[in-house]
Image (spheres, grey):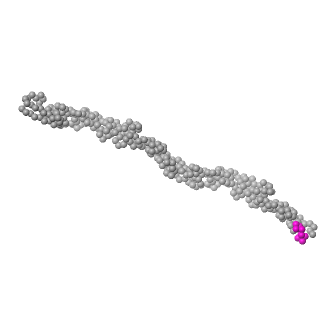
Amino acid sequence: TVESCDTGWDDCDLLASKGCEIATAVDLANCGSCANVCPARPNADETCDLGVCGFTCLTGFEDCDTLVDTGCEVDTMTNVSNCSSCGNVCAVPANATPGCAGGVCGIGTCNTGFADCNVSAADGCEVNTLNDIANCSTCGNICPAPANAAPGCAGGVCGIGTCNTGFADCNVSAADGCEVNTLTDVLNCSTCGTVCPVPANAVPGCTAGACGFTCNTGFADCNLSAADGCEVDTRTDVANCSACGLSCPTPANATRTCNAGACGFTCNTGFGNCDGSAANGCEINLSTNPSNCGTCGNVCASGTCTAGVCVTGPANDTRAGAIIISLATPSTSLSADTT
């Protein structure tokens, strides 16, 4: 029989032949006494030390609540409130939730619309991918510059930022950028949809974003009013012949004219411009001038011109049988003298 076991040993099978076969000081199934099994704890290895049950946390786990039953309840590799060690709380990065990876504090997840493009937890999720033209929707997605505009990023979609001065996106399409030059476009003058009107006798225009017009050939805007457009036909207007304010002179005994933008005149009935000079107008009275009777250069042989017709014989001829004949055509005279 076994009278007594050495300290730290026990005869658990009650076989004297085996003596005190169990080291109760360290045996997990018989810790301190026979059949005293050390319970398993979460995330830990059971221990029996000097006959007292205990446990050792597995790598990466800790017993932060110091409760035996919960064992090593904390994963210090991932727990943001106990990262690497109990009580080490990870700070909240900018625009993100905190994270703990491998026992090191960092970024858990970025807030919606933000990203950690420089891969540094120090400044958190530093990029707003909803409006960053260098990282639009995702890191590294650079928005191209549209035509006549600066690039933009809105809602994570590349598009037009701002149109260059004098341009506008009138069709609301980023594909062709700011396609309209509002400084010169007559359909979108200064702003989209502002259509320049078409004045009378003119072609509409847009200059520096202001509506205007160009007169058609032969017309002019002499009253400087857009309301009636190019109201003057400078080809025929005697007060504005060839140009505004250029008034044709009125020669003596004549009516002034403007033809194809050149001043001229038409002699009044009974007068003629026999010297071909516009300076003295229609200087000859064709009704009475015997050197230009009826027409310039028609010289009366008798020296008498009446109502533009040459008269034969002396005036008041009393000779017997004298016959005076005149033709209706002022350029021709015929006389017969019978005695």
Q: Position of residue 22 (x, y in %)?
A: 86, 67
Q: Position of residue 50 (x, y in %)?
A: 85, 62
Q: Any magenta on residue 186?
A: no
In magenta, the rendered stretch is 11-20
Q: Residue at x 31, y 36 (%)?
A: 238
> Nearest the camera: 8 or 196?
196
Farthest residue toward the bottom? 17
The quadrant the N terminus occupies is bottom right
Question: Compared to 203, does 283 lie above or below?
Answer: above
- Magenta region, main secondary structure: loop
Q: Any magenta on residue 15?
A: yes
- Can you see residue 246? no
Q: Position of residue 71 (x, y in %)?
A: 78, 58
The quadrant the C terminus occupies is top left
Q: Residue at x 80, y 57 (%)?
A: 69
Q: Is residue 263 left or right of residue 67?
A: left
Q: Is residue 99 left or right of residue 251?
A: right
Question: Compared to 284, does 145 lie above or below?
Answer: below
Q: Residue at x 90, y 66 (%)?
A: 5
**Residue 311 is drawn in which quadrant?**
top left
Question: Compared to 77, does 2 lie above or below?
Answer: below
Q: Is residue 159 left or right of residue 39?
A: left
Q: Residue at x 37, y 38 (%)?
A: 231
